[in-house]
Amino acid sequence: MSENFIYLIKEILGKKRFEIFKFICENCDESGFLFMKLDDIMKTLKLSKPTLIASFKFLEEKKLLKRLKNGLYKIKLGEKNEA
């Protein structure tokens, strides 16, 4: 991934949201599932709970992430997202 592209995405999402989304992408399985509780993500990324919850809500609103249940999320890249 080019540095210009990374810079652009950071500017669009914001640095913390970018780091969270990058973490999710790097830690999901080949089917796009992330099996991790918010507390574990908070500790790993050293973020506050309100920051993490707001970022997850933002990603869900943009239809990039779907919460299936506590500790189970589905990344929705490459799927048709309804506007």
Image (cartoon, rainbow, N blue to C red):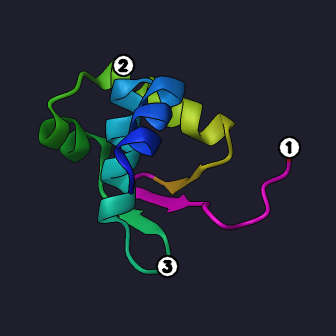
The secondary structure that dominates the magenta segment is: loop
Q: Amino acid at mark 2?
A: Pro
- Which of labels 2 and 3 is toward the front? 3
Q: Amino acid at mark 1?
A: Ala
Identify the mark at residue 68; answer none if there is no mark: none
Residue assigned mark 2: 50
Rendered view: 67 above or below 47? below
Front residue (pair 7, 33): 7
User: Residue drawn at (18%, 37%), measured in percent from left and top?
Assistant: 45
In the picture as drawn, the residue positioned furthest to the right comes out as 83
* Disc 2 to disc 3, C-alpha distance: 28 Å
Indicate whether residue 75 is drawn in magenta: yes
Q: Badges 1 and 3: C-beta atoms under 8 Å apart?
A: no
Image quarter where the C terminus lies is top right
Front residue (pair 10, 74): 10
The range drawn in magenta is 70-82
Rendered view: 75 above or below 63? below
Residue assigned mark 3: 31
Residue assigned mark 1: 83
Residue count near mark 1 (Cα–Cα under 10 Å), binned few <14, some 14–19, many ≥20 = few
Left or right of residue 42, residue 63 in this image: right
Percent x, y for residue 82?
85, 51
Q: Secondary structure at mark 3?
A: loop
Q: Secondary structure at mark 2?
A: helix
